[in-house]
Amino acid sequence: MTMGILFRSAAVVCLGVLLAACDTPDPEPPPSESPGTDRPPVSALRATGNEPPWLLQIDETTVQLTLEYGQRVLEGPSPPVEQTPEGHGWRGVLEGVSIQAVAREEVCRDSMTGMPHPLSVSLRLDDERLVGCGGDPLHLLLGEPWQVETIAGTAPVEDASITLQFAADGRLSGSGPCNRYTGPYTLTGEGLGVGDLASTLMACTPAKLDQEDAFHALLREVYRFDIDTSGALVLHASEGRTLIARR
């Protein structure tokens, strides 16, 4: 075999190795968690009800039920969570009282405050049945940005994209008809409030600027929120005005 043939053979082998390396796919990055997936495990539950008032708290080790305006407290080891056709369930005996709780993933509104919660909870004590709400209302707000459909009944102008995104650290951010904005929000047992907003200073049309002013003004007057039957977010402000957004 001549020296030229040897060189050509070596070149072919090297090229084949390079092509094989190029055809090897890069390893896929690990999947990232979607916003709003930081819910407590199903083994944890906090639920309340009214008329009569009750408070149920379950964690991985303990279950505690408070009744009669705090005058009666039943406590014991936490029973294992069960998957039932109705939802996540717990069954056990607390100080001689048979207890059965079922939590369903559906919007439940507190009968006293109207605050929406992510879980509807039924509780049976021996032969007595109680109903209430469970889970943290914040989990209804967290996740992907909400796309605003109407501001006090008016749709976004000139194809403007208006968004809201709630973060777990108490920050609200998004885009208005013209500018990006950010500011604090507070969620309490009584309702939702939005603080002063800071925004960028982009130039845009008068119509967009007017709607941005109306958007910020309405946000500052929000006092509660709800999730309607279609899954839309409804922010309630003074004088019956609402902001409606959905994902």
Image (tube, rainbow, N blue to C red):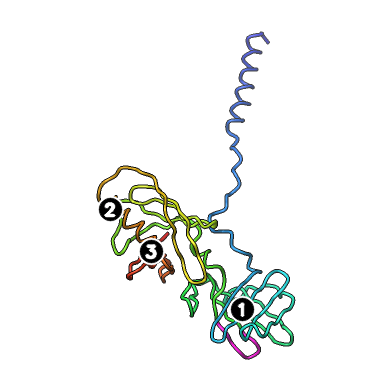
Q: Quadrant of residue 230?
A: bottom left
* Among numbered discs 2 and 1, the one appearing first in the sequence: 1
Q: Quadrant of residue 60?
A: bottom right
Q: Amino acid at mark 2?
A: Asp
Decide whether the magenta segment is chiefly helix, strand or loop. strand
Magenta highlight range: 124-131
Query: Which of label 2 and label 3 is nearer to you?
Result: 3
Seen at 45% across and 64% down, the residue is 193
Q: Tell me the crowding category of disc 1: few under 14, some 14 to 19, or many 20 or more residues within 10 angstroms, Cα based.
A: many
Q: Secondary structure at mark 1?
A: strand
- Residue on which the image places disc 3: 221
Q: Position of residue 27 (x, y in %)?
A: 61, 40
Question: CA–CA distance between discs 2 and 1?
Answer: 47 Å
Disc 2 to disc 1: CB gap under 8 Å: no
Q: Any mark on residue 55, and which?
A: 1
Q: CA distance from mark 1 to mark 3?
A: 31 Å
Q: Residue furthest front?
A: 196
Q: Residue furthest bottom?
A: 127
